Amino acid sequence: MVNLSGFHGPALPTPLLNASQFMIGSYVGLLLQPGQLERKARTITLAFGGGAVLIAGSLWFSTIVSRIHSISLPTSFLSLAPGGMDQMGIMAHEVGG
């Protein structure tokens, strides 16, 4: 809401962005408890397969969106890519999207 009013926050230093991404990834990784999975191979296979389908679909749709509208392919892909908003924001910042 504040950003819509024209106020822009200060740019964050790169080491702070890198540290925050590392901490978020570490926290999510520590939440995973592989010992509690009953069928590990099936779960891992489905997770990778589902992820591949989501990424392929996002790439396909982002190609269509970038051709219809005047936005770059990386920007349209990041806007449609599956994942958490925090990670998509960090990736968009890195590619200048």
Image: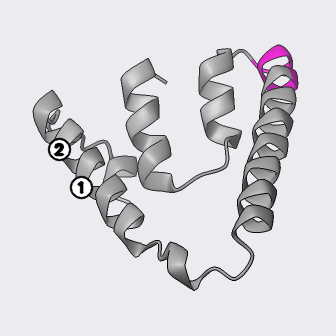
Instruction: Tell me if I can see residue 69 in this picture.
Output: yes
Query: In the rendered image of this protein, does residue 11 appear above or below residue 73?
Result: below
Work out whether 95 lies above or below 14.
above
Q: Which residues are magenta?
A: 64-69
The quarter of the rendered structure image containing the N terminus is bottom left
Q: In what element is the residue under mark 2? A: helix
In the image, residue 52 lies at what x, y percent? Answer: 78, 41
Q: Which residue is mark 2?
A: 19
Q: Is residue 51 left or right of residue 68?
A: left
Q: Is residue 62 left or right of residue 32?
A: right
Report x, y in % for residue 47: 73, 58
Q: How far is the residue under mark 1 from the one under mark 2?
A: 6 Å
Q: Nearer the viewer, residue 88 or 29?
A: 29
User: Are discs 1 and 2 less than 8 Å apart at CB?
Assistant: yes
Q: Which residue matches tag 1?
A: 23
Q: Does residue 27 show up magenta in the picture? A: no
Local crowd at mark 2 within 10 Å, few (<14), some, or many (≥20)?
Answer: few
Q: Measured along the vertical axis of the image, is residue 41 above or below residue 90?
A: below
